[in-house]
Amino acid sequence: MRVCDGGWKTDIYAQSTKHLGRGPIYKDGRGGTMVLTRVKSGSVATKITTGGGASVSGIVAEAKAEVSRESVKEVSWDTQHQYRRDIHRNKYGNAQFGSWGHYVKWQKYYQLPNCKKTQISYGTADVANKTVGFKFWETSS
């Protein structure tokens, strides 16, 4: 028979990359080249978007172990950053600065000494990452 240490556990069971944008969305075009210089400071924090019972600290600790060692409670920036991107003809370029983090699904449960789980709560969270930069996408209008 397997024996576990038991107690409260937080577990991430699904994740995907997500840009956590902060501040204005810049738009330029039709066609041409978009050149941006970000000079304003800002920050993005990890936040639990649905569910309850888990802490941001617990989610970040689990994300560091299972998703990315670069996961943090909050990331801030204050240095200048220039971004240049060509825009396809007849399209508009859009860009926003932020953290290249993750969207995660989590569960918090109590584990019995016989390793069985009693699920208490579950939800989702946006986890910030130390990596920051512009996200770029094109639109027709």
Image (cartoon, grey):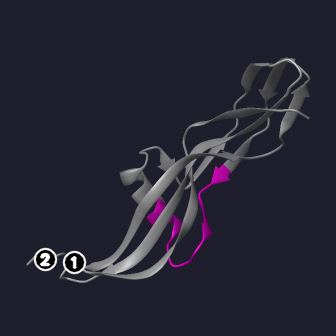
Q: Which residue is mark 1?
A: 115
Which quadrant: the N terminus? Answer: bottom left
Mark positioned earlier in the residue sequence (2 or 1):
2
Q: Residue at x 85, y 35 (%)?
A: 26
Magenta extent: 44-59
- Please tell me the numbered disc located at residue 3: 2
Which quadrant: the C terminus? Answer: top right
- In the rendered structure, which amino acid carries the disc numbered 2? Val
SS category of the residue bearing label 1? loop
Residue 129: % across, % down:
54, 45
The alpha-carbon separation of the residues under discs 2 and 1 comes to: 6 Å
Q: Is residue 57 magenta?
A: yes
Residue 86: % across, % down:
78, 17
Q: Judge from the rendering whether residue 27 lies leftward or rightward of residue 134; answer left or right.
A: right
SS category of the residue bearing label 2? loop
Badge 2 local density, few (<14 within 10 Å), some, or many (20+)?
few
Q: Is residue 20 visible?
A: yes
Q: Residue at x 81, y 19 (%)?
A: 88
Q: Nearer the viewer, residue 114 or 8?
A: 114
Q: Nearer the viewer, residue 55 or 18?
A: 18
Whether 50 is drawn above or below 33: the answer is: below
- In the rendered structure, which amino acid carries the disc numbered 1? Cys
Residue 137: % across, % down:
75, 33
